[in-house]
Image (cartoon, grey):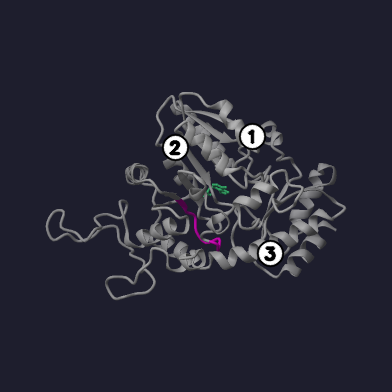
Amino acid sequence: MKFNTKTIHGGQKPDDAFGSVIPPIYQTSTYAQSTPGGHKGYEYSRSANPTRTALEKSFACIENGNYGLAFGSGLAAIDAVLKLLEPGDEVISTNDLYGGSYRLFTTIFQKFGIKFNFVGMGNASNIEGFITDSTKLIWLETPTNPMMNIIDIKAAAVISKKYNILLAVDNTFATPYLQQPLDLGADIVMHSATKYIGGHSDLVMGALIVKDKDLADRLYFIQNASGAICGPQDSFLALRGIKTLHVRMQRHCENGKAVAEYLVNHPKIENVYWPGFESHPNHHIAKEQMNDFGGMVSFTTKGNNYEEAIKIVENLKVFTLAESLGGVESLAGHPASMTHASIPKEEREKTGVVDSLIRLSVGIEDEDDLIADLKQAIG
Ligand SMILES: Cc1ncc(COP(=O)(O)O)c(C=O)c1O
């Protein structure tokens, strides 16, 4: 099956009970047994639930993996990956990443004896210099949140394989429509399914997808033992979202391009971060590993003027000032005070997250209305 068919049919079959084409919401915690252990594959909904199973099969299929796991949030999915590690293990992470991932690493897992190195990965060979005998995991996002840096997944995978280290890729911004990290050599793909996968800003969810059975078994054990699963209603909504992922992403990419090209020519705007520009430092890698450039665009005001930036986000009318991204509606965020506030100022400024940075999640509204909204807000 090609991708646009997989989003609709991947891992799906009519429900066994009545042939329901769409998986029912199995709103149950438990399942009747005829004798102890005599059940139809489901015992208790933390371990497995049929609606969640349908979603997990869809996750596996769209990312070209063999196993999918759904969690109660993106951070719960990352938490499960980190629980593969032992005290004393080391992680090499990109230095430009979602603030909540940084907070999870530095305030929760660091105190259990896991060491994190935050490294610029614009040149993937930088990773190699940080590898020690204790390095067990390389964690990367690409495009990164919010600076839209691009990391060469294939090159990172060559390094991870050479040293027998797990490579995990947060594929939230790109989605499998644009990029399929397992095909490029990653071991684990992670999503905040809250974003493009769900696509309608109506749920919070995380996903992991892997190819390897042993790794999948270890993660399923953690999913059940730690219990950070999502419920059947959210599983149903995410499955419905996935069915239109390809058409939504196509429009997100078109509108993202139009917005980036509008902003880059605006006299009041200093920098525009979007991997589709030929001037983007890793445009050539984006072109190779992605099918298009996505709907996320970040920019700064002339002279890094904080007050100007705040005025812009307050003036927007079609774009809503809000946390999150990846829904059909356009959102604007101010990373320094919102999504990335948990990263110390000196740390975030090193990667470009300055006080005038605005991040846009360009939705699928009419392109002309989005441009007109930016025009009136920037002035
Ligand atoms: C790139 C990225 N990874 C992970 C997360 C965390 O996901 P969640 O908010 O679903 O826990 C986010 C949330 O914004 C994100 O943008």
Secondary structure of the residue carrying tag 3 is helix
Q: Quadrant of the N terminus?
A: bottom left
Report the residue marked by disc 3.
254
Task: Work out whether 323 lies above or below 237.
Answer: above
Few, some or many C-alpha atoms within 10 Å of disc 1 (few <14, some 14-19, many ≥20)?
A: some
Please name the residue that numbered disc 2 is placed on: 82
Span of residues in magenta: 199-207
Relative height, residue 102 to residue 111 (above, below): below
Residue 169 position within the rendered picture, expressed as x and y whole percent measured from the top left: 52, 44
Residue 219 image-quadrant placement: top left
Kind of residue sitting beneath label 1 = Gly
Viewer-nearest residue: 200 or 266: 266
Q: Residue 266 at x, y = what percent? A: 84, 55
Q: Is residue 224 found left or right of 230 in the rendered image?
A: left
Dot 3 or dot 2, earlier in sequence: 2
Residue at the disc numbered 1: 120
Say which of 125 and 20 sits in front.
Answer: 125
The residue at the point 65 percent across, 36 percent down is 123
Mark with earlier residue (1, 2): 2
